[in-house]
């Protein structure tokens, strides 16, 4: 199975000036754990994860004052839609992260998460039988 079969194609995209509170609210509303941050001044494509927001709040930083650009990972490992899920899982395990931005010919095509991969590898639970 390939990354394109498991990735989410509906992507939350943020700008560098969004506050962390705005990012958290949007991520929560969309029920996603990561957002793509587009910042042409800082190298283009980055990723902001729930862990980035948690770390900032844990340090006592104000989520209304902190901007996404200060917490975005810009040295991103990108996946291709033609990678196998094994290749994506290996990259995540090696890098210690849970999301990969998927690029197709240089354009953001989706995001694949550990959860997406698990959902493809493990069939959904069967409903419990009613006695």
Image (cartoon, helix red, strand yellow):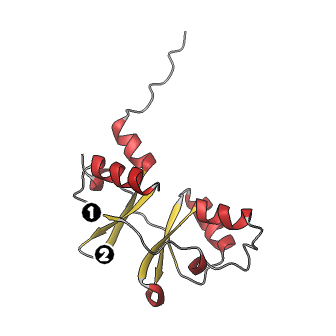
Measured as percent of width and height from the top left, residue 92 is found at 40, 54
Q: How many marks?
A: 2
Q: Image quadrant for the C terminus?
A: top right
* Front in this rendered view, residue 26 or 69: 69
Residue 89 appears left or right of 96: left
> Tag 2's secondary structure?
strand
- Residue 23: mark: none
Q: Residue furthest front?
A: 94
Which tag, 1 or 2, sits closer to the chain's start? 1
Of tags 1 and 2, the one toward the viewer is: 1
Q: Residue at x 37, y 46 (%)?
A: 117
* Front in this rendered view, residue 30 or 72: 72
> Tag 1's secondary structure?
loop
Q: Is residue 68 above or below residue 100?
A: below
Q: Residue furthest top?
A: 131
Q: Is residue 73 above or below residue 116?
A: below
Q: Residue at x 74, y 66 (%)?
A: 59
Measured as percent of width and height from the top left, residue 101 is found at 38, 65
Q: Report which quarter residue 50 is drawn in.
A: bottom right
Measured as percent of width and height from the top left, residue 118 is found at 40, 41
Q: Residue at x 44, y 58 (%)?
A: 99
Badge 2 local density, few (<14 within 10 Å), some, or many (20+)? few
Residue occupied by mark 1: 80
* Front in this rendered view, residue 26 or 51: 51
Residue occupied by mark 2: 107
Q: Are marks 1 and 2 in contact (CB under 8 Å)?
A: no
Q: Residue furthest bottom?
A: 41
Q: Image quadrant for the N terminus?
A: top left
Q: CA distance from mark 1 to mark 2?
A: 10 Å
* Front in this rendered view, residue 38 or 124: 38
């Amino acid at each position: 199975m390939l990354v394109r079969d498991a990735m989410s194609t509906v992507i939350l995209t943020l700008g560098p000036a969004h506050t962390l509170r705005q990012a958290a609210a949007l991520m929560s509303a969309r029920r996603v754990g990561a957002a793509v941050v587009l910042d042409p001044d800082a190298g283009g494509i980055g990723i902001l994860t729930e862990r980035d927001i948690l770390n900032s709040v844990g340090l006592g930083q104000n989520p209304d004052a902190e901007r996404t650009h200060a917490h975005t990972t810009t040295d991103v490992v990108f996946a291709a839609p033609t990678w196998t899920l094994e290749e994506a899982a290996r990259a995540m395990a090696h890098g210690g992260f849970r999301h990969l931005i998927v690029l197709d010919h240089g354009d953001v095509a989706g995001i694949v998460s550990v959860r997406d991969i698990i959902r493809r590898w493990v069939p959904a639970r069967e409903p419990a039988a009613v006695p």
